[in-house]
Structure formats: C-alpha cells, structure tokens
Image (cartoon, coloured by chain):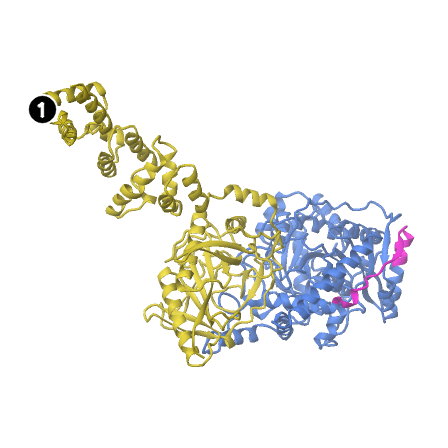
Amino acid sequence: MINLSIRELNQLLAKKQISTAELSSVYLDRCRQFNPSLNALLHINNDINPEDLLTANQIDGLLSGIPIIHKDLFSTQGVTTTAGSKMLADYAPPFDATVVSRLSQAGMMSLGKANMDEFAMGSSNEYSYFGAVKNPWDLKRVPGGSSGGSAAAVAARLTPVATASDTGGSIRQPAAFCGITGIKPSYGRVSRYGMIAFASSLDQGGVMAVSADDCGLVLEAMMGHDDKDSTSIKTEAWQWQAPQQPSMKGLKVGVIPGWVEQLKDDDIKRSTEQALKTLTEQGAELIEVDLPHADLAVAAYYILAPAEASANLARFDGVRFGHQTSQQCDNINAMYRKTRSEGFGDEVQRRIMLGTWALSSGYYDDYYCKAQRIRRLISEDFKQAFSQVDVMAVPVSPEVAFKQGDKSDGVNMYQADQFTIPASLAGLPCLSMPVQPAKGLPVGLQLIGPYFDEQVILSTAAQFQMVTDFHKQMPEAFV
Amino acid sequence: MSGQWDVVIGLEIHVRLALDSKLFSGASAQYGASPNSQVSFLDAALPGTLPVVNEKAIDYAVRFGLSIDAEIPEVTRFARKNYFYPDLPKGYQISQMDDPIVGRGQIEIETEQGTKTINITRAHLEEDAGKSIHDQYDDWTAIDLNRAGTALIEVVSEPEMTSAKEAVAYMRAIYNRVTFLGICDGNLQEGSFRCDANVSLKPQGSETLGTRAEIKNLNSFRFIEKAINYEIKRQKKILAQGESVVQETRLYDADKDQTRTMRGKEDANDYRYFPDPDLPALNIITDRLDRQRAAMPELPEAKLNRYMEDWQLPEENARQIAYDVAMAKFFEASQAQTKAKPADNAKFLITDFNALLNEQDSDLADSKISPTDYAGLMDAMASGEISRKIAKQVLDKMWASGESAATIIEQQGLAQISDSDALHKIITRVIKDNPDQVEQFKAGNDKMFNYFIGQVMKQTKGQANPAQTKQILEEQLNNE
C-alpha cells in the first residue's frame, strides 16, 4: 500500500477500504519506526490532528485525507518551525504559511515537519542544527539539500508527499539523490507568505512526491495568487490535466550536449542519454540548444542569494523571538554579536558575511550589480532557447548522492549546483524525475519549462513515468 | 582664514502620511495607542511575513509630487536600508534609493527679499522605525513598535537656503503644502513633521561647498531657526580660527540652545542599500496621475489668483485667506451660499470674525458658527437689512446662542428700517419738529444735514437704512 499513488489512495478511501485516520496512522507508524535511522523529520505529530480529520471528512477531492509532511521552513501555527536552525529551535509561529493553509483546506493530513539545511543553505543536509539527514538508499550518504528531509521522507515512504522549497536547486537535487519526483514551480506561482526567507527573489515553494502526477495534483492545490505576497503573480489558475497515454509526437525537447559531456561519471552519463532516448522513442524530437552565459550562473548566484540572505536574516537579533545569548553583554552590539554567533551555524554565517560584503559600498557595483546583469543575460539565453523548443531536458547533478563528510568545504559544494542554478536565476519551472539508477543509487533528469508553463514539464514527466518504473523503485530497507 | 562666509542650508523633511494603516502591514497607524497594541506579524518581523504596499500611500506621495510640479517617474522601486537597532525589527528599513517616487520639483518661499524658488531634489516613501524608550526603566530600554512601519515621505531639498530664516520659510512652505493637500495631519508634537538640517559655510562667492554638519530631528519652527543659527555661529568660529569643520551628525539641545556631536563620520553606517526583492517595481500609470490630479485640492497659489481675478479681493485679503486651509474652506463654503460681495465677506471674515475667534480663544476649524449660518448673516448685511455694526453684534449673539442670524435679527428687532413709507413718515415728522434747523439748512448750513440724520437714527434706534435715509431726507428738504 505504501507505494500507491495519490489517485490509488483516494480510491481506497472512496471505497472505504481504509479510513482517513487509518491511512494517516499507517504513515505515522512508519515515521516513528524509520525516522531514528534517517533523521528526516524534526517533528512527528503525536496523533492525528482532529481538525485535519474534520476537514478531510467534510471535503471531497483527490487530496482529501492524503498525508503530507511540511519542510520545516513553512510556518505552522502553534507547531515549532525551526528552519533547521538553533536560532529558531523553540519558535512556534502564530500563523500558518499560505501553502500550509491551502493544503489543509484541501483536506490533507499533516504528519510532521521535515529536517533541512539551516535556513535552506546547503546541498547535503549536513548543515542542519538538528543533525544530518541520511539517504534511505545508503545511510552513509547524504540525501542532498536543502530539502533533504522532505526527499528522504518521501523516498522511504514516510509520507506519500512533502512540501519543499528550492532557491538554487534545493528541490531538484535532493529529489535526484533520493530517487523521487520534485517540482519547483515558476517564481511567483506559489505564495511565499509564511515560508521563512533565504533569498527572496529566488525562493519558491514546491512539491516532492513519488510521481509527476502526484506533484501535479498537490501543486494545483497550493499554487495561485496570494494577496499577502506581492511577488505572487495574478494569473488564472490551471488545472492539472494528467496525460491519458504517452504521446510525445511533435514535442520539441531542448538538450545541451556540453552539459552531458561534463558528466565525469559514465554511469550518470549513460542514464541521462538513455532517458533522452526514451523521450525520442515516445515521439519527442531532440534539439540542441545553448545557454552561453550559464557557466557564470554559480558565481552570480553566490553573490545574489547571500546578499538577500544577509538582509533577510538580520531580524534574528535576539530582541523579539528566537535564540538570545545567555552571556552577560555590556551593550546591544555585544548582545547581537553573541546571539548571532551562537544561533547561526558556520555555513549561514559564511553566507551572511559574503552577502554583507557584496553589498558594501565600493563593492556593490562590481559584485551585486554585475551579478544582476548576469542574471538578466541568463534569462535572455533561456528565452532564446524556448523560442526553439517546448521543454528542456538536462542533468540535475554531476554526481550521485555523495558520502557524508565528503564535501566539508562549502565552496566545493557550491559547484555541485551548476545545472540547477540557471533555471532558478531565470525563475523558470523545473523538476527532477528518476531515471536509470547508477550503481544502485538514484539519478535524476531535469526538465525545464518556459515561464509559467508547469504543465509541459509535468506532462512530459508523467508520460515518461508511464513507460518507465524508476519512480516506483524503493530503497529495500524501507519496503 | 577670515572674512565673509556664505551660509548654505539643505533640509530633509520627514512627513508622516495621514493614513489609517501602515505602509506595508495593514496594521492601524493611529497615534497614541497603548504600547505595542498596533503591531502586526510583519511589524514584529516574524519570519515568513511579507510587505504589501499601501496603495493610498503611493497616491499621497504622487499627489505631493504633482503639487510641487515634480517629475513622477514611470517606475518606482523600494530598497532595503540595512542597519541593526532594537526598534528596527527587520534589521532593515524599507525605503527608496535609486528610483524615488517623486523626482525634481520646486516650491516658492516668502523671504524678506521677496519670493524665492527652492528646488526639491526628490521625495521618497519609507517606513518609520519603532520607538526606544530609555528613561522609563533603570536597567531596561523599552521598545514600542506601534510606530514601526508607519508611512513617511522624506522630502530632500537642494542646498539653496542661505539663512535660518529661509530654512524656516521653506519648512513652513512644505508644512502648508502637505497639510493643505490633506496628506499630513501637521501635528508637530506627535512628530508628524520633522526635519534634519544640513548646514555648511563657504567663502563668500565660492562655488565649492564647505564641509557640512547635519542637525537631526528638529520638530519645531522655532528650534530649527535657533539650531541653525547656533550652528552657523559655531562653524564661523571654527573657520575663523583657521580650523576645519568636521563632517558629523549633531543634535540640538533646546534647553542649552546649542548643538552637540551625536556621531562622527567614522561611525556612519554603510547602509548597503539594494532593491527590496519582496516588492516588485511599481509602474505609476497615467491613470493614477490623472486620478490624483483630480483629487488634488486647489493650491494656495491658484486660490490667490482666483480670489483676486474672479472675486476682486484685494491682494492682502486674498493671500490671508488663500494660505490658511481652514479660512479658505470656510470662506468658500459661505460665499457659495450668499449674495454678498466676496470682498465684503472676506473683509468681515478677516477682521470681525477673526476678532471674535481671538476673543473666544477658538479657531475656524471648530467654529460654533457654520458657514451656512454665517452666509445668512452676510445676506442680511448685503441686503441692507442690517448694518455692519449691527452685524458684529448679531455675530456675537450667534456664537453665544447658536441661533441663526435671521432669528436673532427678528427676535431682537435689529433689522434696519428700509421700508420707504415708514421712513418717509419718520422724516416728515423730524422736519416738522425742527423748523429752526430747516431754516438754517436752507440758509446754506450744510452741517445741518447730519443733524437730521442723527435725529432719524435716534427715532429709529439706529435701525434706519443709512443710504435710504440720506436719499429721502435730501428729497424732502429740497421740497421744503
């Protein structure tokens, strides 16, 4: 049962073969059983939330009664929301994030909160104050980050679906490392209200699930304009139309041969090429495209994201909420310094300093402004590419899940985001879906769509998943 | 270095917008509520909260821009100004840097040498910080976030004022403008209008500006004049001794009437401004400009012209009314309801009504007499029913009783006798009763005419219509 899709679970509920409470209990039991070995969850509900149950019993719809876990970046009223940081270890928000309230209004059953890299900064989930998350496929390996907890939880089927967030690859890379499907919608598609900010112009909430169809169903319920978020775009909501059969005839798929060439791991290269071949077998046409400025993306991103973070994280000052130093302080600046040195981990401090420096007078034009120009150039590159193709298919990560401790040097880890950052800078919808594993470890393929066209990537992925079963594979230890 | 110095002053004025809610949070912006009772999740900077701009604040800023003939750029953007302070919850203030909502404009000020135009560099929107209260507890600083996030516009002038008096005149001009537009309540005590002054000296005739000192947080017209004059004296003394003025921020101490160092240049913050990614750039569309143009009240300059050209008011009277919001409003409302000549209305309002208000220690804004009732009084005066002298008495009685002019005139029999039959009878009797005086008049003693007027007034207790009396008296005397 734990490997069923949302539609299949909905059928079980509709036919009363299982009750909503029983379904949640099955998953809650798995959370309690498996989380000690994974550390994927920071909070597991003691019991089924009676309010959730009430709503689920009143609401019809495919998502009603379906369990979900929220990344601990999304504010949950009265439930501790830490963003993986000591700074917020005891912080319980007085309100729900828009994403959380929309999904609970759709009748979804919240089971708990997922571990993550502190303030969503990291690509391995080793930067959580609450300890590293383990990859269910190999407990010595990382699940990717920053949504590593969400990814590991879905991969181990502690939940059928989880919310996640992506700033430079934080949904796609862990989805690839854990062998699940994860979508980052277009910037402005999903409300950021109540999602703790890392880099406001890049952060976007999204979904992780077993399949693209599941992602489409959940995304439909959580997206749409929100008056509380000025960057959420006013457009008509779309309804997820699941393809009935695989038919990619006429679909123009953009590929970047240079990126595939760069893959040093022959197994990943082979898996990627094979996945592209599967697309052509279904009628898709592969067209070579180029993103000439993409090699500047990582450098630009690691100026812009830390710059925004340096301001976003200034509110954690020990004055109103969150951690405050218990040391004696002679003045307010000493209090700030001690509170922030104690409350933030090394990677967060590194990025705050980097961002503060990039915005400082004398450096602003050379770094921040130049990075913004690069960002615009990359957006133009994508526009150019999408004048020729409907969707792009590129690698997610140059490697499979690496071993814990392998990349203790932060900057070394930054380069691993090279394939995910360009679409983030351009604000485009993108997803990662499982393809042929390499040496028993999952590999992902990234699909990127034109701005605000989530349907094309979801539909392409859903068709791919009709003719493959990589997304159905589960780590044996958790069957 | 000794000799003559030119004074150069530029002002940054912070105008609190008279809005019900804050600039980005929707929380109430009411002044004087109990501490921290008007703080939304955003105002407290809870993680995940986001700013949504108050459209009315945009409208107000645009209205101000239009009123100073400023360029209103098509695109305006908010920026983050970063610094740590306990009453700044987000650790940054949302302000504007590169794309302010109001570009270059200008305003006229009255100086001893006549009218002078001061150029305004820009005006931008920003949120206010909260309040730190240091003197309430021995070991603590208290923080009140009610003010945090309330909407301000900062109006930055060019350094074009050359004396403290000019700076005050400029401050007054901006004050009058924003209160006239209804975008600021003008309450100085509550900090709705406050100003920073940049003061520097340069050798007479020099093109190069000297080093400036900034005096922070002046919130009274009197203090700004004193503070600037003190600062000019201080800098002159330094320069006269051959030393240099240090660039710094100073505070004015009203008790000691002097400025003192608040922080030096080396302590100045690097604010690390950058565009706020939570707030997309705003397009100021023509529609909005048109709506604000339509919503804009007539400005004092335009009123002055209209009063003089259309209503033939003497300039002095026209100016006195046009530049006073309450008086102009009262004047125009009453004029719309009376047949009295505008010039007579204006004269009575400025002299007689004002005298009453002074006497009663009141002002027009909360006058006990409505423009409608006042218009009734003007009509009674214009029709000749009562004289100006009686009108003053009626006005006093209106204030005291709240009755209309018509009621008071009727009840107390104050109406002039304008009935010509009645006047004819009275005058016939006066002439009959005073044959000697008639003889003297006929003999050429013109002064006797006033004697008859006096007699008629005596008979009528001063209520005879003077013009009519004069006319009938002339006719009858000539017929004798």
Location of residue A432 (image quadrant): bottom right
The answer to whether residue A452 is left or right of residue B426 is right
Residue A121 visible in the shown view: no
- Which quarter of the figure is the C terminus of chain B placed in? top left
- As drawn, the residue found furthest toward the right would be A281
Q: Please, what secondary structure does the residue beneath circle 1 have?
A: loop
Rendering coords of residue B85 (x, y %): 49, 68
Question: Which residue carries the number 1 mark?
Answer: B434
Residue under the point 67% across and 58% down: A204
In the picture as drawn, the residue positioned furthest to the front comes out as: B443
Colour displayed for chain B in the image of the structure = yellow
Classify residue A266 as left or right of residue B388. right
- The span shown in magenta is A276-297
| Chain A, chosen colour in render | blue
- Report in which chain the residue with disc 1 lies: B
Q: Is residue B48 left or right of residue A150?
A: left
Residue A404: give x, y in percent of width and height: 73, 74
Amino acid type, mark 1: Asn
